[in-house]
Image: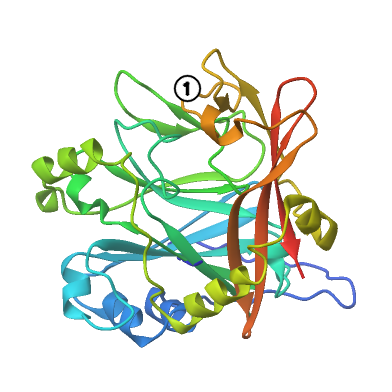
Amino acid sequence: MKKRISALLIAAVAICLAAGTVLAANYLLTAGEAAAELSGSAVARAFEGQDALSVNEARTAGGYRVTFLGVASGAALEDAAGAGTDRSKTYSVVGIERADGTALPEDAFAEESFFVSPLVKGLDPAKYNIATMNGSYVEKVIDGVLYRMTECDNVEIFADRGLYLCVQQGTFYDTDAYLWDQDTGAITPNPAYEKLNLLFDLPVDAGLADPQKAQAYLDGMWQEPQPDLPESEEERAAWKAIAEYEDKSADELVAAGRPVSGSALTLRRNENGDYLENGATTPTVLAEQAAGYQPGDRWVYSFGAGGADGIVTVQATICTLNGDGTLTLETYLLD
């Protein structure tokens, strides 16, 4: 899956580099250029139209420099209507670099996982994010920079509430990375969090909001969704790669794969039997999803895929029920 954004003032610094050090490119692709690399010309045209938003804002945290390149939805997608675009979606693009200027490897997603998602002011970010808003992403490392394009349901309908784009380390939304004020609805980065936890404003015109449609969307959000059809050659390749592993057991996938560094997440069980992160109020794994399993059992939670230069790598997130009653989610790369 896929996404990107940017803006800044750079001081000149002399750096002595060890022999063999690989540097990232000193320029970034535009949102449209990155979209063309990730998904094709139709989505790229959406980012180049007059209704798209070129953000170009850059910030640094947790050893990474992230540039929010741009966002396209609604009218911008109407202008670029065609195969590969969905006018009911919001697309955003970010570029992620190492802050020290060294290049990310082409298979960076194998070792360094990121979570990029729109968030809505006033809504619990642990409950309302790309994972629950029919989202997906595509990513690729180009000249040492990881470009990611995210796609989710159109968030313009919430524009009057205030919108953000979060970029954090990890496979899932981390409740420790951000603070949510339930009284004001504001979401802010947690200053005590030591890893990447940036938050950008998503500059969508409040006049594009549709409060009635927004409420209807929220009311129907937890109904069983219909599966989306693949939108591009890259997504079709991803689904094909995933299909090769869908009949494998969790134990077979663990044996065949290698764990993604930092992806392990331990969930506690509440009084309803649901499993949550520490401090969270919204379950990550529901009781019925763990029903019938015994301590030590494993099962498949989800599949994902990413790629570079035509090579698709499948990721499987595995649930393990622990003897102390907790549950562990961990993502494995399947070579």
User: In the shown orientation, is residue 132 left or right of residue 25?
Assistant: left
- Tell me the quarter of the image containing the C terminus: bottom right
- From this viewpoint, which residue is outermost toward the front? 292
Classify residue 89 by image quadrant.
bottom left
User: In the shown orientation, is residue 275 left or right of residue 255?
Assistant: left
User: In the shown orientation, is residue 269 left or right of residue 49?
Assistant: right
Classify residue 5 by image quadrant.
bottom left
**Colouring style:** rainbow
Count of numbered labels shown in the rendering: 1
The residue at which mark 1 appears reads as 281
Neighbourhood count class around disc 1 (C-alpha, 10 Å): few under 14, some 14–19, many 20 upward: some
User: In the shown orientation, is residue 261 left or right of residue 59?
Assistant: right
Q: Is residue 101 visible?
A: no
Residue at (62% x, 33% y) in the render = 193
Residue 226, horizontal then vertical, whole percent: 33, 57
Q: Nearer the viewer, residue 90 or 186?
A: 90
Q: Name the amino acid type tagged 1.
A: Thr
Residue 241, horizontal then vertical, whole percent: 62, 74
Classify residue 97 by image quadrant.
bottom right
Residue at (31% x, 18% y) in the render = 183
Residue 128, horizontal then vertical, whole percent: 37, 39
Q: Is residue 219 visible?
A: yes
- From this viewpoint, which residue is outermost toward the top? 271
Q: Nearer the viewer, residue 297 or 233?
A: 297
Residue at (63% x, 63% y) in the render = 246
Residue at (66% x, 67% y) in the render = 314
Residue 262, horizontal then vertical, whole percent: 73, 46
Q: Secondary structure at mark 1?
A: loop
